[in-house]
Image (spheres, helix red, strand yellow):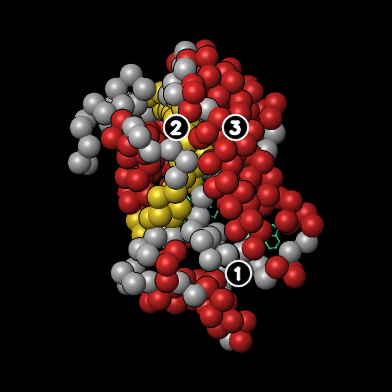
Amino acid sequence: MMYAANLFEDKVALVTGGRSGIGYGIAEALLKLGAKVAICSRKEAPLAEAAEQLSKLGPCRYQACDIRDGAQVERLAERIKSEYGRLDLLVNNAGGQFPSLARAISDNGWNAVINTNLNGTFYVSRIMAEHFFIPQASGNIVNIIVNMARGFPGMAHTGAARAGVENLTKSLAQEWATYNVRVNCVAPGTIISSGLHTYAEPVKALLEEMKADNLMGRHGRVEEVANAVLFLASPLSSYTSGTTLYVDGLDHLHSDRMRLVNGVRSS
Ligand SMILES: CCC/C=C/C(=O)SCCNC(=O)CCNC(=O)[C@H](O)C(C)(C)COP(=O)([O-])OP(=O)([O-])OC[C@H]1O[C@@H](n2cnc3c(N)ncnc32)[C@H](O)[C@@H]1OP(=O)([O-])[O-]
Ligand SMILES: NC(=O)C1=CN([C@@H]2O[C@H](COP(=O)(O)OP(=O)(O)OC[C@H]3O[C@@H](n4cnc5c(N)ncnc54)[C@H](OP(=O)(O)O)[C@@H]3O)[C@@H](O)[C@H]2O)C=CC1
Protein backbone atom coordinates (compact mmCIF):
# COMPACT_ATOMS: atom_id res chain seq x y z
CA MET A 1 0.00 0.00 0.00
CA MET A 2 1.67 3.21 -1.16
CA TYR A 3 -0.82 5.73 0.24
CA ALA A 4 -0.39 7.24 3.74
CA ALA A 5 -1.82 4.86 6.35
CA ASN A 6 -4.16 7.54 7.74
CA LEU A 7 -5.35 8.90 4.37
CA PHE A 8 -9.03 8.24 5.18
CA GLU A 9 -8.92 8.58 8.97
CA ASP A 10 -12.30 9.84 10.28
CA LYS A 11 -13.84 9.40 6.82
CA VAL A 12 -16.96 7.32 6.22
CA ALA A 13 -17.41 5.43 2.94
CA LEU A 14 -20.30 3.48 1.39
CA VAL A 15 -19.33 0.84 -1.17
CA THR A 16 -22.33 -0.61 -3.01
CA GLY A 17 -21.82 -4.22 -4.06
CA GLY A 18 -19.07 -4.37 -1.42
CA ARG A 19 -19.66 -8.04 -0.62
CA SER A 20 -17.64 -9.39 -3.54
CA GLY A 21 -14.92 -8.84 -6.10
CA ILE A 22 -13.99 -5.28 -6.92
CA GLY A 23 -16.30 -3.76 -4.30
CA TYR A 24 -14.81 -5.95 -1.58
CA GLY A 25 -11.30 -4.95 -2.70
CA ILE A 26 -12.24 -1.26 -2.55
CA ALA A 27 -13.78 -1.65 0.94
CA GLU A 28 -10.68 -3.52 2.09
CA ALA A 29 -8.33 -0.81 0.78
CA LEU A 30 -10.36 1.98 2.40
CA LEU A 31 -10.40 0.19 5.75
CA LYS A 32 -6.63 -0.31 5.60
CA LEU A 33 -6.26 3.45 5.21
CA GLY A 34 -8.39 4.26 8.25
CA ALA A 35 -11.90 4.71 6.82
CA LYS A 36 -15.13 3.54 8.42
CA VAL A 37 -17.05 1.57 5.82
CA ALA A 38 -20.60 0.49 5.01
CA ILE A 39 -21.34 -2.10 2.36
CA CYS A 40 -24.63 -3.07 0.75
CA SER A 41 -25.91 -5.57 -1.80
CA ARG A 42 -29.02 -7.66 -2.38
CA LYS A 43 -28.00 -10.98 -0.83
CA GLU A 44 -27.89 -10.67 2.94
CA ALA A 45 -26.00 -13.86 3.88
CA PRO A 46 -22.85 -13.32 1.77
CA LEU A 47 -23.02 -9.63 2.63
CA ALA A 48 -22.93 -10.39 6.37
CA GLU A 49 -20.05 -12.80 5.83
CA ALA A 50 -18.06 -10.19 3.89
CA ALA A 51 -18.70 -7.55 6.57
CA GLU A 52 -17.48 -9.96 9.24
CA GLN A 53 -14.20 -10.49 7.35
CA LEU A 54 -13.78 -6.80 6.60
CA SER A 55 -14.45 -5.86 10.24
CA LYS A 56 -11.09 -7.40 11.11
CA LEU A 57 -9.54 -4.35 9.39
CA GLY A 58 -11.79 -1.68 10.93
CA PRO A 59 -15.43 -0.65 11.40
CA CYS A 60 -17.59 -2.19 8.67
CA ARG A 61 -21.40 -2.16 8.78
CA TYR A 62 -23.68 -3.80 6.25
CA GLN A 63 -27.27 -3.59 5.12
CA ALA A 64 -29.08 -5.55 2.43
CA CYS A 65 -30.28 -3.09 -0.19
CA ASP A 66 -31.33 -3.33 -3.82
CA ILE A 67 -30.07 -0.09 -5.37
CA ARG A 68 -33.00 -0.20 -7.83
CA ASP A 69 -35.43 0.49 -4.97
CA GLY A 70 -35.34 4.10 -3.72
CA ALA A 71 -37.15 3.21 -0.46
CA GLN A 72 -34.45 0.65 0.39
CA VAL A 73 -31.74 3.20 -0.41
CA GLU A 74 -33.45 5.74 1.90
CA ARG A 75 -33.36 3.15 4.71
CA LEU A 76 -29.67 2.58 4.02
CA ALA A 77 -29.00 6.33 4.34
CA GLU A 78 -30.84 6.41 7.69
CA ARG A 79 -28.78 3.46 8.90
CA ILE A 80 -25.50 5.13 7.93
CA LYS A 81 -26.65 8.29 9.72
CA SER A 82 -27.43 6.38 12.91
CA GLU A 83 -24.23 4.30 12.80
CA TYR A 84 -21.68 6.88 11.64
CA GLY A 85 -23.44 10.27 11.58
CA ARG A 86 -21.99 11.28 8.22
CA LEU A 87 -20.83 10.08 4.81
CA ASP A 88 -17.75 11.32 2.97
CA LEU A 89 -17.41 8.90 0.07
CA LEU A 90 -19.85 6.95 -2.08
CA VAL A 91 -18.45 4.27 -4.39
CA ASN A 92 -21.18 3.22 -6.82
CA ASN A 93 -19.73 -0.20 -7.63
CA ALA A 94 -22.84 -2.45 -7.62
CA GLY A 95 -23.73 -3.50 -11.13
CA GLY A 96 -23.56 -6.12 -13.78
CA GLN A 97 -25.09 -7.55 -16.90
CA PHE A 98 -25.19 -10.69 -19.00
CA PRO A 99 -23.53 -11.32 -22.33
CA SER A 100 -25.90 -11.28 -25.29
CA LEU A 101 -26.07 -9.98 -28.81
CA ALA A 102 -28.43 -6.99 -28.86
CA ARG A 103 -31.15 -8.66 -30.92
CA ALA A 104 -31.50 -11.42 -28.30
CA ILE A 105 -31.94 -9.06 -25.32
CA SER A 106 -35.56 -9.13 -24.12
CA ASP A 107 -37.28 -5.98 -22.86
CA ASN A 108 -37.03 -7.29 -19.30
CA GLY A 109 -33.36 -8.13 -19.72
CA TRP A 110 -32.66 -4.66 -21.10
CA ASN A 111 -34.61 -3.01 -18.29
CA ALA A 112 -32.91 -5.11 -15.61
CA VAL A 113 -29.49 -3.92 -16.75
CA ILE A 114 -30.49 -0.27 -17.22
CA ASN A 115 -32.27 -0.26 -13.84
CA THR A 116 -29.27 -1.75 -12.10
CA ASN A 117 -26.44 0.23 -13.61
CA LEU A 118 -27.96 3.58 -14.56
CA ASN A 119 -31.07 4.06 -12.43
CA GLY A 120 -29.60 2.44 -9.31
CA THR A 121 -26.49 4.60 -9.53
CA PHE A 122 -28.63 7.72 -9.85
CA TYR A 123 -30.92 6.82 -6.93
CA VAL A 124 -28.01 6.13 -4.57
CA SER A 125 -26.14 9.28 -5.66
CA ARG A 126 -29.14 11.58 -5.25
CA ILE A 127 -30.24 10.12 -1.93
CA MET A 128 -26.75 10.17 -0.38
CA ALA A 129 -26.19 13.72 -1.65
CA GLU A 130 -29.48 14.88 -0.10
CA HIS A 131 -28.82 13.16 3.22
CA PHE A 132 -25.12 13.89 3.55
CA PHE A 133 -23.04 15.61 0.89
CA ILE A 134 -25.16 18.71 0.28
CA PRO A 135 -25.91 19.51 3.96
CA GLN A 136 -22.28 18.73 4.89
CA ALA A 137 -21.02 20.85 1.95
CA SER A 138 -18.50 18.09 1.22
CA GLY A 139 -18.54 14.73 -0.45
CA ASN A 140 -17.02 12.51 -3.08
CA ILE A 141 -18.56 10.02 -5.51
CA VAL A 142 -16.67 7.46 -7.57
CA ASN A 143 -18.71 5.52 -10.13
CA ILE A 144 -17.36 2.19 -11.32
CA ILE A 145 -18.38 1.86 -14.94
CA VAL A 146 -16.75 -0.24 -17.65
CA ASN A 147 -14.59 0.47 -20.66
CA MET A 148 -17.22 1.15 -23.36
CA ALA A 149 -15.30 3.88 -25.18
CA ARG A 150 -15.84 2.15 -28.54
CA GLY A 151 -19.30 0.80 -27.73
CA PHE A 152 -19.80 -2.62 -26.18
CA PRO A 153 -20.87 -5.18 -28.80
CA GLY A 154 -21.94 -8.33 -27.00
CA MET A 155 -23.18 -6.27 -24.01
CA ALA A 156 -25.03 -3.35 -25.63
CA HIS A 157 -27.30 -2.88 -22.60
CA THR A 158 -24.45 -2.30 -20.19
CA GLY A 159 -22.58 -0.13 -22.72
CA ALA A 160 -25.63 2.14 -22.93
CA ALA A 161 -26.17 2.18 -19.17
CA ARG A 162 -22.52 2.94 -18.35
CA ALA A 163 -22.36 5.66 -21.01
CA GLY A 164 -25.37 7.11 -19.20
CA VAL A 165 -23.50 6.97 -15.91
CA GLU A 166 -20.46 8.63 -17.46
CA ASN A 167 -22.60 11.50 -18.73
CA LEU A 168 -24.50 11.68 -15.41
CA THR A 169 -21.10 12.03 -13.74
CA LYS A 170 -20.34 15.11 -15.83
CA SER A 171 -23.71 16.67 -14.95
CA LEU A 172 -23.58 15.95 -11.22
CA ALA A 173 -19.97 17.10 -11.01
CA GLN A 174 -21.02 20.51 -12.33
CA GLU A 175 -24.28 20.82 -10.36
CA TRP A 176 -22.65 19.79 -7.08
CA ALA A 177 -19.27 21.54 -7.36
CA THR A 178 -20.82 24.39 -5.39
CA TYR A 179 -21.36 21.96 -2.48
CA ASN A 180 -17.71 20.85 -2.62
CA VAL A 181 -18.71 17.46 -4.05
CA ARG A 182 -16.50 15.80 -6.66
CA VAL A 183 -17.83 13.08 -8.97
CA ASN A 184 -15.64 10.86 -11.14
CA CYS A 185 -15.68 7.47 -12.87
CA VAL A 186 -13.28 4.56 -12.93
CA ALA A 187 -13.63 2.46 -16.09
CA PRO A 188 -12.11 -1.01 -15.66
CA GLY A 189 -11.25 -3.25 -18.56
CA THR A 190 -11.33 -6.97 -17.87
CA ILE A 191 -10.51 -7.55 -14.21
CA ILE A 192 -9.87 -10.92 -12.59
CA SER A 193 -12.62 -10.97 -9.97
CA SER A 194 -15.69 -12.87 -8.80
CA GLY A 195 -17.71 -11.10 -11.50
CA LEU A 196 -16.02 -13.14 -14.20
CA HIS A 197 -17.07 -16.40 -12.50
CA THR A 198 -20.68 -15.56 -13.39
CA TYR A 199 -19.88 -16.06 -17.08
CA ALA A 200 -20.24 -19.45 -18.76
CA GLU A 201 -18.58 -20.79 -21.89
CA PRO A 202 -18.08 -19.52 -24.55
CA VAL A 203 -17.49 -16.22 -22.75
CA LYS A 204 -14.62 -17.78 -20.78
CA ALA A 205 -12.85 -18.54 -24.08
CA LEU A 206 -13.55 -14.98 -25.15
CA LEU A 207 -11.87 -13.72 -21.99
CA GLU A 208 -8.71 -15.60 -22.95
CA GLU A 209 -8.81 -13.94 -26.37
CA MET A 210 -9.29 -10.56 -24.74
CA LYS A 211 -6.18 -11.19 -22.66
CA ALA A 212 -4.15 -11.98 -25.78
CA ASP A 213 -5.57 -8.88 -27.47
CA ASN A 214 -4.61 -6.59 -24.56
CA LEU A 215 -1.48 -4.53 -25.27
CA MET A 216 -0.16 -5.32 -21.79
CA GLY A 217 -0.93 -8.99 -22.38
CA ARG A 218 -2.99 -9.52 -19.26
CA HIS A 219 -6.23 -8.86 -17.40
CA GLY A 220 -6.31 -6.31 -14.59
CA ARG A 221 -6.28 -6.94 -10.85
CA VAL A 222 -8.85 -5.84 -8.28
CA GLU A 223 -6.13 -3.86 -6.42
CA GLU A 224 -5.44 -1.84 -9.57
CA VAL A 225 -9.08 -0.72 -9.68
CA ALA A 226 -9.08 -0.05 -5.92
CA ASN A 227 -5.93 2.07 -6.21
CA ALA A 228 -7.59 4.26 -8.84
CA VAL A 229 -10.61 4.70 -6.56
CA LEU A 230 -8.33 5.66 -3.67
CA PHE A 231 -6.73 8.36 -5.80
CA LEU A 232 -10.07 9.85 -6.89
CA ALA A 233 -11.48 9.57 -3.36
CA SER A 234 -8.53 11.34 -1.77
CA PRO A 235 -7.31 14.96 -1.70
CA LEU A 236 -4.54 13.85 -4.09
CA SER A 237 -7.09 14.48 -6.87
CA SER A 238 -8.62 17.64 -5.34
CA TYR A 239 -8.83 19.55 -8.67
CA THR A 240 -10.27 16.62 -10.64
CA SER A 241 -14.00 16.16 -11.19
CA GLY A 242 -16.31 14.99 -13.97
CA THR A 243 -13.64 12.72 -15.46
CA THR A 244 -13.11 9.04 -16.21
CA LEU A 245 -9.96 7.16 -15.27
CA TYR A 246 -9.45 3.99 -17.34
CA VAL A 247 -7.92 0.97 -15.64
CA ASP A 248 -7.84 -1.27 -18.67
CA GLY A 249 -4.31 -1.74 -19.97
CA LEU A 250 -5.17 0.46 -22.97
CA ASP A 251 -8.24 -1.48 -24.14
CA HIS A 252 -10.21 1.76 -24.58
CA LEU A 253 -7.79 2.76 -27.35
CA HIS A 254 -7.08 -0.60 -28.82
CA SER A 255 -9.48 -3.48 -28.30
CA ASP A 256 -11.63 -4.73 -31.15
CA ARG A 257 -14.53 -6.34 -29.36
CA MET A 258 -16.56 -6.86 -32.52
CA ARG A 259 -13.82 -9.09 -33.92
CA LEU A 260 -13.89 -11.09 -30.68
CA VAL A 261 -17.69 -11.31 -30.69
CA ASN A 262 -17.62 -12.53 -34.30
CA GLY A 263 -15.07 -15.16 -33.24
CA VAL A 264 -17.49 -16.49 -30.61
CA ARG A 265 -20.44 -16.33 -33.02
CA SER A 266 -18.68 -18.42 -35.64
CA SER A 267 -17.25 -20.99 -33.21
C1 LIG B 1 -15.45 -7.99 -20.35
C2 LIG B 1 -16.00 -7.98 -18.99
C3 LIG B 1 -16.52 -6.64 -18.60
C4 LIG B 1 -17.46 -6.65 -17.51
C5 LIG B 1 -17.41 -7.55 -16.52
C6 LIG B 1 -18.32 -7.45 -15.39
O1 LIG B 1 -19.10 -6.55 -15.24
S1 LIG B 1 -18.21 -8.68 -14.25
C7 LIG B 1 -19.58 -8.42 -13.14
C8 LIG B 1 -20.61 -9.43 -13.42
N1 LIG B 1 -21.53 -9.48 -12.29
C9 LIG B 1 -22.80 -9.39 -12.50
O2 LIG B 1 -23.24 -9.21 -13.61
C10 LIG B 1 -23.63 -9.55 -11.28
C11 LIG B 1 -24.90 -8.79 -11.28
N2 LIG B 1 -25.77 -9.13 -12.40
C12 LIG B 1 -27.09 -9.43 -12.25
O3 LIG B 1 -27.61 -9.46 -11.15
C13 LIG B 1 -27.91 -9.69 -13.53
O4 LIG B 1 -27.04 -9.91 -14.60
C14 LIG B 1 -28.85 -8.52 -13.88
C15 LIG B 1 -28.06 -7.22 -14.03
C16 LIG B 1 -29.54 -8.87 -15.18
C17 LIG B 1 -29.90 -8.29 -12.84
O5 LIG B 1 -30.57 -9.46 -12.53
P1 LIG B 1 -32.10 -9.53 -12.07
O6 LIG B 1 -32.09 -10.29 -10.82
O7 LIG B 1 -32.80 -8.25 -12.11
O8 LIG B 1 -32.60 -10.31 -13.29
P2 LIG B 1 -33.82 -11.30 -13.39
O9 LIG B 1 -33.34 -12.68 -13.07
O10 LIG B 1 -35.04 -10.78 -12.68
O11 LIG B 1 -34.05 -11.19 -14.96
C18 LIG B 1 -34.47 -10.02 -15.56
C19 LIG B 1 -34.42 -10.24 -17.06
O12 LIG B 1 -33.02 -10.36 -17.44
C20 LIG B 1 -32.86 -11.55 -18.19
N3 LIG B 1 -31.57 -12.18 -17.95
C21 LIG B 1 -30.92 -12.27 -16.78
N4 LIG B 1 -29.78 -12.98 -16.95
C22 LIG B 1 -29.74 -13.35 -18.26
C23 LIG B 1 -28.81 -14.08 -19.06
N5 LIG B 1 -27.72 -14.60 -18.52
N6 LIG B 1 -29.08 -14.24 -20.38
C24 LIG B 1 -30.18 -13.72 -20.92
N7 LIG B 1 -31.11 -13.01 -20.22
C25 LIG B 1 -30.89 -12.84 -18.90
C26 LIG B 1 -33.94 -12.49 -17.67
O13 LIG B 1 -34.19 -13.51 -18.58
C27 LIG B 1 -35.10 -11.52 -17.48
O14 LIG B 1 -35.76 -11.26 -18.70
P3 LIG B 1 -37.07 -12.11 -19.16
O15 LIG B 1 -36.67 -13.55 -19.20
O16 LIG B 1 -38.12 -11.85 -18.10
O17 LIG B 1 -37.40 -11.56 -20.51
N1 LIG C 1 -14.78 -7.80 -13.32
C1 LIG C 1 -14.67 -7.09 -14.41
O1 LIG C 1 -13.95 -7.47 -15.36
C2 LIG C 1 -15.36 -5.78 -14.52
C3 LIG C 1 -16.32 -5.36 -13.64
N2 LIG C 1 -16.93 -4.15 -13.82
C4 LIG C 1 -17.94 -3.67 -12.89
O2 LIG C 1 -17.41 -3.57 -11.59
C5 LIG C 1 -18.43 -3.81 -10.63
C6 LIG C 1 -18.03 -4.94 -9.71
O3 LIG C 1 -17.83 -6.11 -10.49
P1 LIG C 1 -17.23 -7.47 -9.92
O4 LIG C 1 -16.78 -7.29 -8.52
O5 LIG C 1 -16.31 -7.99 -10.92
O6 LIG C 1 -18.54 -8.39 -9.99
P2 LIG C 1 -19.48 -9.02 -8.85
O7 LIG C 1 -20.55 -9.75 -9.59
O8 LIG C 1 -18.65 -9.78 -7.87
O9 LIG C 1 -20.04 -7.74 -8.14
C7 LIG C 1 -21.29 -7.16 -8.36
C8 LIG C 1 -21.78 -6.70 -7.00
O10 LIG C 1 -22.92 -5.86 -7.17
C9 LIG C 1 -23.94 -6.32 -6.28
N3 LIG C 1 -25.22 -5.98 -6.93
C10 LIG C 1 -25.64 -6.36 -8.16
N4 LIG C 1 -26.87 -5.87 -8.40
C11 LIG C 1 -27.21 -5.15 -7.30
C12 LIG C 1 -28.34 -4.40 -6.95
N5 LIG C 1 -29.40 -4.29 -7.77
N6 LIG C 1 -28.38 -3.78 -5.74
C13 LIG C 1 -27.33 -3.90 -4.90
N7 LIG C 1 -26.22 -4.60 -5.17
C14 LIG C 1 -26.17 -5.22 -6.36
C15 LIG C 1 -23.70 -7.81 -6.11
O11 LIG C 1 -24.19 -8.32 -4.88
P3 LIG C 1 -25.64 -9.03 -4.75
O12 LIG C 1 -25.68 -10.13 -5.76
O13 LIG C 1 -25.66 -9.51 -3.32
O14 LIG C 1 -26.64 -7.96 -4.99
C16 LIG C 1 -22.19 -7.86 -6.12
O15 LIG C 1 -21.68 -7.66 -4.82
C17 LIG C 1 -19.71 -4.08 -11.44
O16 LIG C 1 -20.42 -2.90 -11.64
C18 LIG C 1 -19.13 -4.61 -12.74
O17 LIG C 1 -20.03 -4.56 -13.80
C19 LIG C 1 -16.58 -3.31 -14.82
C20 LIG C 1 -15.64 -3.68 -15.71
C21 LIG C 1 -14.98 -4.95 -15.65
Q: Position of residue 71 (x, y in %)?
A: 70, 26
Q: Earlier in the sequence, mark 2 or mark 1?
A: 1
Q: Is residue 4 above or below residue 131?
A: below
Q: Is residue 267 left or right of residue 55?
A: right
Q: Earlier in the sequence, mark 2 or mark 3?
A: 3
**Alpha carbon distance from label 3 to label 1:** 28 Å
Q: Which residue is mark 2?
A: 182
What residue is rendered at 79% in x and 57% in y? 107
**Alpha carbon distance from label 2 to label 1:** 31 Å
Contact between marks 3 and 1 (CB within 8 A): the answer is no
What residue is rendered at 63% in x and 45% in y? 118
What residue is rendered at 38% in x and 77% in y? 212
What residue is rendered at 49% in x and 21% in y? 179
What amino acid type is highlighted by mark number 3? Val
Q: Is residue 113 left or right of residue 82?
A: right
Q: Which mark is residue 124?
A: 3
Name the image quarter holding residue 188: bottom left
Disc 2 within 8 angstroms of ligand 2 (CB): no
Q: Is residue 204 left or right of residue 227?
A: right
Query: Which of 21/173 is in front?
Result: 173
| Quadrant the C terminus occupies | bottom right
Q: Residue furthest right?
A: 107
What amino acid type is highlighted by mark number 2? Arg
Q: Position of residue 160 (x, y in %)?
A: 64, 56
Q: Dot 1: few (<14), some (14–19), or many (≥20) neighbours within 10 Å?
A: many
**Alpha carbon distance from label 2 to label 3:** 15 Å
Q: Position of residue 41 (x, y in %)?
A: 56, 37
Q: Dot 3: few (<14), some (14–19), or many (≥20) neighbours within 10 Å?
A: many
